[in-house]
Amino acid sequence: MFLLRLQRLILQNFRNYTFLNEVFNTDLNIFVGKNAQGKTNLVEAIYLLGLGKSYRTNRDSELIKWGCDRALVNGMVIRNFGPISVEIRLDNSKKKEILLNEIPNKKIQELLGHINVVIFSPEDLELVKGSPAKRRDFLDREISQINTGYGHFINMYSRVVYQRNNLLREIPKNKKLIDSLNVWDLQLIDLGARLVKKRLEIIKKLGILSRLMHRKITNGQETLELKYISRFPVNETYSMEDIKEVYSRELSKLREKEIYRGITLLGPHRDDLGLFVNNTDIRVYGSQGQQRTTALALKLAELELMKSEVGEYPILLLDDVFSELDSTRRKFLMDVVKRVQTFVTLTSLEGLNISGIKQEYCIYRIEEGSIIRCD
Ligand code: ATP
Ligand code: MG
């Protein structure tokens, strides 16, 4: 089987967990608990091992148990390429530390791609109806997990946008500075074009997979289409040089406006992922059910894409999603779960048709930051 398996998870002073040391022997792990017991916190810890940062907050200090100075998350993962241990040490007084196979001082860039995870939670509805930033984030996180190096370009690009914005705001006060704008433009176009090119490639693949998923969920009734939406015209047939050319041309047209507004108006930081169902913009006009189906199709496509790009399935985290889905979508999701190691959280087992599960599974009860295995 080509899949990642989280075999052991250790938590120390992470969120509401004082200490946890659990070995997972099955691929389907079900966590049941009332509200505010630590279900999402557990899922967040596994996510942290994969991406080096939380999806709920940008402030690492929030992850440390209240009243404590330090926290630790450690995971042992079995993969096709051999086992790997990841440890994240959080400290209120210094930057977080990442260890890979006990080797310290690793950067997030080095961590990415070792433990791939896909998470599906109720907030993922925001992926469809929320702001473009949510969809850009989705694309960027997906690409960073399968393409080491992409995250580095994102950081560099963001820095260029930041510096360029500062310069744009200074120009009205000091007209001579306009000459240095050309230097920043070259960097913006070079880095921006790389990001756009990669996003176009991924959207093409993700588009095929999510359309398939979507058709299955809707019994062939609806067709999902993904489109990259940019303020300069590009499509997946464009080479890097083509992208640079249109980017540069359109950017130069905006120069006066950019100086007036003091911000960079063109580039991947302003783009969006368009989602169309039967040619209707689902971001704006979709019903709740259609938006949920689209979010589910995107997430499952993400899973399949990782498998095809890196050769093994990622870990799937399903936080509190079953209660939101109807029986068709639930059944569909349970079929997917058979192929990957999955961590499911629920407030009640009623949301899951336990007797219908054919694979081995393990149920845990979560109470006030501790988990108890129910055999
Ligand atoms: P729900 O079913 O409502 O989603 P949950 O089981 O997913 O609940 P969590 O989000 O995991 O709940 O949070 C569990 C508890 O952990 C909450 O009461 C929250 O206030 C608490 N908590 C969050 N951060 C910290 C922290 N840094 N230190 C201690 N406790 C925390
Ligand atoms: Mg929760």
Image: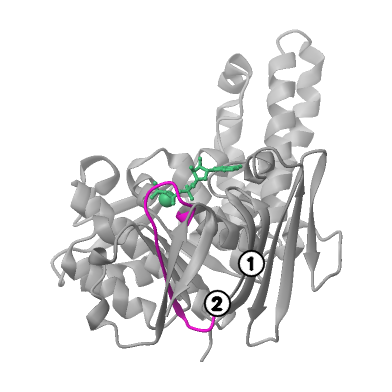
User: Relative to residue 36, is residue 263 drawn left or right?
Assistant: right
* Residues tagged 1 and 2 counted as in contact (Cβ below 8 A): yes
In this view, the residue farthest toward the right is: 104
User: Relative to residue 309, is residue 169 drawn left or right?
Assistant: right
Q: Quadrant of residue 213?
A: bottom left
Residue at the image position 25 percent from the left and 64 percent from the top = 351
In this view, the residue farthest toward the bottom is: 1
Residue at the image position 79 percent from the left and 35 percent from the top = 183
Measured as percent of width and height from the top left, residue 151 is found at 67, 55
Was residue 30 drawn as part of the magenta stretch in this picture?
Answer: yes
Tell me the element at label 1: loop
Marks 1 and 2 sit apart, C-alpha to C-alpha, by 9 Å
Q: Nearer the viewer, residue 375 or 343?
A: 375
Query: Can residue 246 be seen in the rendering of this structure?
Result: yes
User: Relative to residue 290, is residue 185 drawn left or right?
Assistant: right
Magenta-colored span: 24-39
In this view, the residue farthest toward the top is: 173
**Dot 1 corresponds to which residue?**
147
**Dot 2 corresponds to which residue?**
309
